[in-house]
Image (spheres, helix red, strand yellow):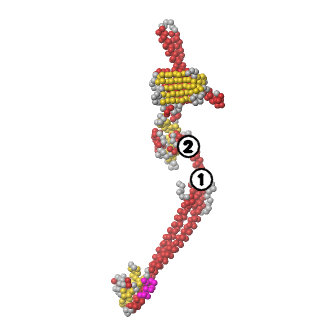
Amino acid sequence: MASSLPPDQDERRPSGSIQRQLLWTTVSVQCLLVLGFIVLMVGHEAQDARDREDQRLNYQSDFLAASAARPLAQNDMDALVHLLEIQRRSVSVRDAQITDLQGHAIVNSNPSLNGRVTLQEDEIQALAQGLQTHVVRTANGKEGVAPVMWQGKTIALAWIYPDPRRERALIRSLLLGGIFYGILAMAANALISISLGRSMLRPINFLLRGTRKVAHGAPPADVFPLEVRTTNEIGELTEAFNAMVESLESQRAGLHDTLALLDSMLANAPVGFAFLDSKCRFVRVNQFLADMNGAPISRHLGREIEEVLLPEVAEQARQMVTTVFDTGASLSDEELSSLEADRGQSRSWSANFFPVRSSGDQVRWVGVIVSETTERKLTEEALRRSEKLAAAGRLAASIAHEINNPLEGVTNLLYLLRHHDSLDEQAREYASMAQHEVSRVSQITQQTLRFYRQSTLPVIVSVPEVVESVLVLYQGKVHAGQVRVEKRFVEPAEVFALSGEMRQLVANLIGNALDAMSGSGRLIVAVNPSQDWKTGQRGIRLVVADTGSGMDESVRRRIFEPFFTTKEATGTGLGLWVSAEILAKHQATVRVRSRTVAPSGTVFMVFFPDGGLLAELAKEKDPAAVATV
């Protein structure tokens, strides 16, 4: 994933992070050390100061008690006040006073101290008996007290109140000294960390930039191999990195070649390739399969097969993909088929499913190789039908040939019978009618043999005669369907053509016209000399029109496609396709008009240009001769 930082910041980010971590680590450790040192030092010094203050209070209270004994015994108040003033001048004394044994002030340096009692009764008795001196701790601080003795008796109590500002100043000075020392220590550690970090991270940054270039693509030749700038572990890491990059480049080149071969094979193979995951979603497809499904590759990727394939095919394919994932075995030559609703045709495919395994020998994808067999199946079906038609044609020709010989005998016998003297007029009329019907049967057999024995050489063909011979074949169908045939021939109407193919063309057009009329109707066949309305070239125009059911636009567009038929039971879908090839060989053109609403019907207009087949034959022999034909 690309970084969102600018290039210069992005390159400095990892090294700066390591340097900051180193800096903050050393500073944090130093802070903890300095803080511990300050706590220990200040605590020790504070305890010493408290001990010294206790000793000083004991001394000062004893001194005050000893100095105040005589003036107090002599009731010399001025001397006592002077004595308290001397005590108060001391920097460590805030206030002083002398009280009686009940704590009432006799003299003091601060009137607010009058009547203040901070000792318990037993403590006062102990002091009155001269047994001890006291350093009393109260909520306001410390107080020093000592008994004033005169002639072996305690006559009063001397109080000293210390000034705490001195102790606080001492502690403050200790704290300031510790803080100053900590700042100096942290600054020194920061400088060391920055210097050490830069010297260590410079080769790491160099290696990091090289790693990024490898990660973003092929490394440039002017950068790799990276220069080994140190002989320590980082230098060894750089050498190992260069070896790794060289190996990766070799593997990448081989992988690119392999992928190029696979991509070329997938893109150009004349079969469909696809890979699907366990949820039957397309992971990759080639263009051939995308064209086969009628959707671009982008419409396949990431979509399930039901979203792309026809419902019947998707259901069959999902079952097979699931089977491969469950069993891990391949499936070969599986037949898939579906009926396209819009085209009304059945499509079929042959598919091979195979597992694609990961490194853990688990089936990660299922590959599919697909080839469409619709045309092959249609060809096979058409071939079978053609074989049946050919066999029927050979059988019909054989029967016609066998019938033709006895028909000639019957015809001769009927001729002799007609001219026999013993017959009356009624019998002769019956014999004449029988001879006429036998002649019709003989004509039908001759036309059947003519279809079977087609000439392979082009000749001058009379189109009206070809139409007449075809109508003779369809005479039974015409009478059965009560179709009225209208023939509009303008003689002469001759073309240079292959007579057998011309007969087949006319038979296809007339046969389709008769099939389109389920009941009574009209069949119009017109042949006349004409000219092309676009080029002005002269030729022969054949028109076959019927009053049948007609064709809609979707059917009309596909009538010349192979295997397309609307006669499911009897049609092969090859009649008009073969007719189109015959027309192309004779350089003829065809126009089709049809309508399905009343009055419905279809019109085929075929134009044969003069010399059309001659031009085609000349083109096959010598393309340069076309202009001279």
Q: Considering the image in quadrants, where does the C terminus appear?
A: top right
Determine which residue is flagged by label 2: 266
Q: Is residue 235 above or below residue 97?
A: above
Q: Which residues are magenta?
A: 84-94
Give coordinates of residue 473: x percent, y percent.
Answer: 51, 21
Q: Is there any visible trace of residue 334 in the rendered image?
A: yes
Give coordinates of residue 253: x percent, y percent.
Answer: 60, 50
Q: CA distance from mark 1 to mark 2?
A: 26 Å
Q: Is residue 4 above or below residue 158?
A: above
Q: Looking at the picture, tell me which residue is in the foreground, 282 or 589.
A: 589
- Residue at image point 42% right, 83% down: 94
- Residue at image point 56% right, 27% down: 607
**Which numbered dot is residue 489?**
none
Q: Looking at the picture, tell me which residue is in the foreground, 151 or 21.
A: 21
Based on the picture, tell me whether residue 86 belongs to the magenta stretch.
yes
Q: Is residue 145 above or below residue 443?
A: below
Give coordinates of residue 403: x percent, y percent.
Answer: 52, 18
Residue located farthest toward the top when viewing the structure as drawn? 422
**Which numbered dot is residue 218?**
1
- Residue at image point 50% right, 49% down: 360
Give coordinates of residue 37: x percent, y percent.
Answer: 49, 74
- Give the quadrant of residue 268: top right
Based on the picture, tell me whether residue 615 belongs to the magenta stretch.
no
Label 1 neighbour load within 10 Å: few <14, some 14-19, many 20+:
few
Earlier-in-chain disc, 1 versus 2: 1
CB within 8 Å, label 1 to label 2: no
| Secondary element at tag 2 | helix
Q: Is residue 149 left or right of residue 410?
A: left
The kind of residue tagged 2 is Leu
Q: How many marks?
A: 2
